[in-house]
Every structure is written in structure tokens, then in C-alpha cells.
Image (cartoon, rainbow, N blue to C red):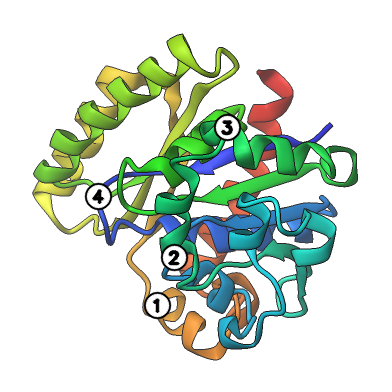
């Protein structure tokens, strides 16, 4: 049985896709079988895994509408050594088309059930909005990984996301829980970053991952080469941090 996790935060530009792609690659290096699900119409996780979204035969759009299954639509990331359920801009139309479908918030869960025994981990990269697509991700998942920058506005958005997760847990998915908060793009030279980091540890305790992802140029460059950062420059501080995060995730799952 695969462990299914959403990487979610309704705030854009907080490193969700970078986290999803590099965690997938890190887990693959730890000999885990991984499926990365790109649930964002921008298709950035698809491109970051080295897959050309313009040349897809089928994608998660067809899967969500029941026009294809996961084995048909998935593609292997040669650079990251994990499978990808890819996305492109067609996915933006799925929200409108799903309105009239039965069980519309559980379409992804039903599709992933068919390959549950083929993976150790499934990671869902959610769009930066609390939309029908994000709701599908939350209904399919066992837990949520929340990447966030240590800045004031991030704290504001975090309370909204936590409330949404509680509502989904109560009404749609009783398995859903917050796995942890991951501090990303961290700059230890900024006093505010240190203060917000301390506040997170004080308020959320062991829900805050010990691993901290530093602000790193090599991680930012990697997607333009169609590679996860940990494969693009394994010696960089960002790559080392995501490898450590992958190991921490495996350990955390054992203790859950």
C-alpha cells in the first residue's frame, strides 16, 4: 500500500513544486517506488521531472475525467528515476467539467487506487489555490506536507490552510492529517526568518520537520535543465538538504 501525500499551500511561490520534485527524486534514491502526481495546470512538476508537457499523449486531465487510467497516462522521469502522472494546461478546464460529475472530489482517489500496490509513495503537487483540484488531492491523501517560507505573510496563510485541512478531515477524508511543515528558501542571515522559524517550532512542535531547505541557486536552475535539483548538482546545499528531508520522511512514516 502506497503512502499518499499532498504537497500543498494556497500561497504561490513557496517551493511546493521544488519540494515535490526533489522529494520524489530523493525517495527514489533511497530505493522507494515513487509516483509524482502533477495536479497543477501549469505543469511545472512535469517539466521539472524532464517531461515535455507539449508532447503528452494523455495526462491527468483525461484520468480525472475517466477518459484514461493511470497506467496509460503515467510517464517515467529518466532524470529522477520515478514515475510521473503529468499535467498540462488542459487540466485548467477539468474544474469546470468536473462540476457535473458524480463523486467529483474523489476522482483522483479512485484513479490512484488502481496502482496503489505498485508504489511506496505517491506525492501530489497541488495548485496554489484551494480549488476542486486541491480538494481532490486532499481527499486522496493520507497526509499533507506544507512547505513554507519563514516570513510574516506565510503565517497568515498557514492558518487558512490548517482550517481547510480540518474541514476536509471532518467531512471527506478522516485519514487526512498534517505530516509536517517544511521550512524552505531559508536565509539564516535574516532575523525575521529566525523569529518565524522559532514561532513555528513553538506552536507546532514536532510537526515541524528538522530538515531546513536553504535558499539555493542550483535548486532554482535545475528545472530549466529538466532535472530535479538533487540530480542536477548533488553536492549543492539544496540537494543535500532535500536528500536529508527524504530520509527524514521515511523515518517519520515509520513512526506514524
Sequence-first disc among 1 and 3: 3
Q: Which residue is mark 3?
A: 102
Query: Who is closer to the viewer here, 22 or 244?
Result: 22
Q: Residues within 10 Å of mark 4 (few under 14, many from 20)?
A: many
C-alpha separation, residue under disc 2 versus residue under disc 3:
22 Å
Residue 65 percent across, percent down from the top left: 62, 52
- Ranked by sequence position, the earlier of labels 2 and 1 is 2
**Residue in the picture at 35% in, 43% down:** 131
- Badge number at residue 41: 2
Q: Earlier in the sequence, mark 2 or mark 3?
A: 2
Q: Nearer the viewer, residue 179 or 88?
A: 88
Q: Is residue 146 visible?
A: no
The outermost residue toward the front is: 100
Residue 25, x across and y down, in percent: 67, 63
State the quadrant of the C terminus. top right
Residue at far right of view: 117
Callout in the foreground (3, 4): 3
Q: Quadrant of residue 146?
A: top left
Give residue 11's mark. 4
Q: Position of residue 189 (x, y in %)?
A: 17, 59
Residue at which label 1 appears: 220
Task: Identify the residue at horizontal 62%, vertical 74% (top origin).
Answer: 49
Residue that appears at 42% across and 51% down: 95
User: Mark 3 or mark 4, which has the lower sequence index?
Assistant: 4
Q: Secondary structure at mark 4?
A: loop
Of badges 4 and 1, nearer the viewer stands: 4
Report the Cα–Cα distance between label 4 and label 2: 16 Å
Of residues 111 and 8, the one nearer the viewer is 111
Q: Position of residue 206 (x, y in %)?
A: 44, 21
Q: Quadrant of residue 219?
A: bottom left
Task: Give the Cα distance between marks 1 and 3.
Answer: 40 Å
Amino acid at each position: 500500500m502506497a503512502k499518499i501525500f499532498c504537497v500543498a499551500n494556497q500561497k504561490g511561490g513557496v517551493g511546493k513544486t521544488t519540494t515535490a520534485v526533489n522529494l520524489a527524486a530523493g525517495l527514489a534514491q533511497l530505493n522507494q517506488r515513487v509516483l509524482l502526481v502533477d495536479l497543477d495546470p501549469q505543469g511545472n512538476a512535469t517539466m521539472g521531472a524532464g517531461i515535455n508537457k507539449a508532447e503528452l499523449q494523455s495526462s491527468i486531465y483525461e484520468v480525472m475525467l475517466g477518459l484514461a487510467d493511470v497506467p496509460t497516462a503515467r510517464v517515467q522521469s529518466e532524470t529522477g528515476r520515478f514515475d510521473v502522472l503529468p499535467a498540462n494546461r488542459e487540466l485548467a478546464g477539468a474544474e469546470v467539467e468536473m462540476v457535473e460529475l458524480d463523486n467529483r472530489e474523489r476522482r483522483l482517489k479512485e484513479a490512484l487506487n488502481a496502482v496503489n500496490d505498485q508504489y511506496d509513495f505517491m506525492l501530489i503537487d497541488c495548485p496554489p489555490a484551494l480549488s476542486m483540484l486541491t480538494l481532490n488531492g486532499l481527499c486522496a491523501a493520507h497526509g499533507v506536507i506544507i512547505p513554507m517560507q519563514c516570513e510574516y505573510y506565510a503565517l497568515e496563510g498557514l492558518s487558512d490552510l490548517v482550517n481547510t485541512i480540518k474541514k476536509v478531515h471532518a467531512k471527506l477524508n478522516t485519514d487526512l492529517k498534517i505530516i509536517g511543515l517544511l521550512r524552505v528558501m531559508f536565509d539564516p542571515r535574516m532575523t525575521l526568518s529566525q523569529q518565524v522559524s522559532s514561532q513555528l517550532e513553538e506552536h507546532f512542535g514536532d510537526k515541524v520537520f528538522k530538515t531546513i531547505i536553504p535558499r539555493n541557486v542550483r535548486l532554482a536552475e535545475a528545472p530549466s535543465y529538466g532535472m530535479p535539483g538533487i540530480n542536477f548538482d548533488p553536492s549543492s546545499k539544496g540537494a543535500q538538504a532535500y536528500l536529508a528531508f527524504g530520509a527524514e520522511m521515511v523515518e517519520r512514516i515509520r513512526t506514524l
